[in-house]
Amino acid sequence: MNATPASVQAALEPAAPQPATPQPAAPEAEKEVLFRVVNRVAIVTLNRPAALNALSHAMVRELAGLLENVRADDAIVALVLEGAGPKGFCAGGDVRALYQLAREQARDGANGWQQFFVDEYRLDYLLHTFCKPIVALLDGVTMGGGMGLGQAAALRIATSRTKIAMPETRIGLLPDVGATHFLAKMPVEMELYVGLTGAMLTGADAVHCRLADACVPGEWLDAYEARLAAAQWTGDVHAALREVFVSPCHEAGEGALASLAPLIVRHFDRRLSVEQIVASLRADLEREHSQAGRAWLEATLEALTHYSPTMLEVTREALLRGRQMTLAECFRMELGIVGRAIEEGDFCEGVRAHLVDKDRKPRWAPATLVEVRSERVRHFLASPWRGEAHPLADLGA
């Protein structure tokens, strides 16, 4: 999930009863998920452009069903995931709807908040382990749940318009949807920086961080269907897909983040707690720096002193643990942490302050990093379930 609000608060409410008589199919423009096949390649479009294609629970369920159909169809050789409209691939999940369910203590049941996460994580795992090549077009805003979908792809295409982030700690959550696994592709210092601060990454930054396989001009994707229609699948399908989606002179520059790597390595040492990282940043601000270096120090310090203290320390530990875990184990760990964050932590307060009342003044509990006790961090990381009782116990079996 992520800190980007979705426009439809009812996305996770119980489904309306189905009418007894058949109803006309919804026009294509009204469907939240579109499906078509071009030259033996399935194209799945997230179709909520007004909400930056944020995921509703119904969309998660529909996507899972479509994947099973694609898996069983021998005529389909690959799958493309894209977002409708010019602004984003997917801004994540419907955070406000989850907030409402949490406020109503609607955890259990088919439409409770816990089932949303269970279904979303199962969908992400299915994508990661899919039997056919997947291409994800990470064009525009790609955050939270959108990263969960996109990072499962064999070919991740960023563009000059890409804006990638995992900003969950800002609202009292942790980077989930498999982030404790896929962020581990980076060096540990970069992983901690991206995961703790929710830094916004460009397409070039994403390639540098191993979160994208190529960065192309946004206009290159506008005509991809014509190239796809002409593609041949007689040899290496993955190589043929690269010819369709990767521009001959793709924008694979280093991006701004590469120049900040020395500062990131200096301050995000895996041995430091978040409280110690903050102290390191403050001490460094007393020294002389370039304008860009000082701006980075100030912005990073701002994030780590204003986001949920509990979830910052919990996220740090979860990211470090995830580097030693399988993908399935990461999803199981994340589900337990998310549940504790919603029921016992800062999630509701974070969403209230940033997305509902918008006073930008969350009252975190505890309020500062120095007050976060190690026992509380361990509690959030301890699974609420034992063995086979875990809702994701069979994942990876």
Image (cartoon, rainbow, N blue to C red):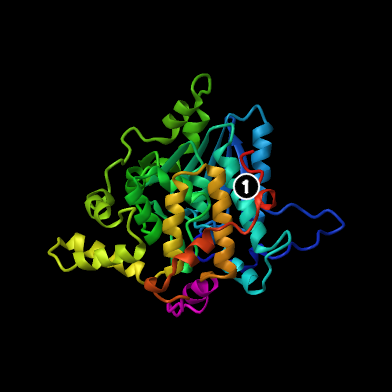
Asked whether residue 25 is drawn in magenta, I would say: no
Q: Amino acid at mark 1?
A: Arg
Q: Residue furthest top?
A: 234
Q: Taking the image as drawn, is residue 341 in sight?
A: yes
Locate the C terminus by quadrant. Answer: top right
Q: Residue furthest right?
A: 20
What residue would you read off at disc 1? Answer: 122
Name the spot of residue 159 as percent of width and height, x first.
Answer: 38, 46
The segment highlighted magenta reads 348-364
Residue at 59 percent of width and 32 percent of height: 131
Name the spot of residue 143 as percent of width and height, x first.
Answer: 46, 55
| Callout 1 crowding tier (Cα within 10 Å): few <14, some 14–19, many ≥20 | many
Nearest to the observer: residue 242 or residue 154: 154
Asked whether residue 354 is drawn in magenta, I would say: yes
Q: Quadrant of residue 104?
A: bottom right
Q: Secondary structure at mark 1?
A: helix
Name the spot of residue 184 as percent of width and height, x first.
Answer: 41, 45
Residue at 36 percent of width and 45 percent of height: 186
Q: In this rendering, is residue 68 above or below 292?
A: above
Viewed as shown, does residue 372 lie left or right of 332?
Answer: left
Name the spot of residue 347 as percent of width and height, x first.
Answer: 53, 69
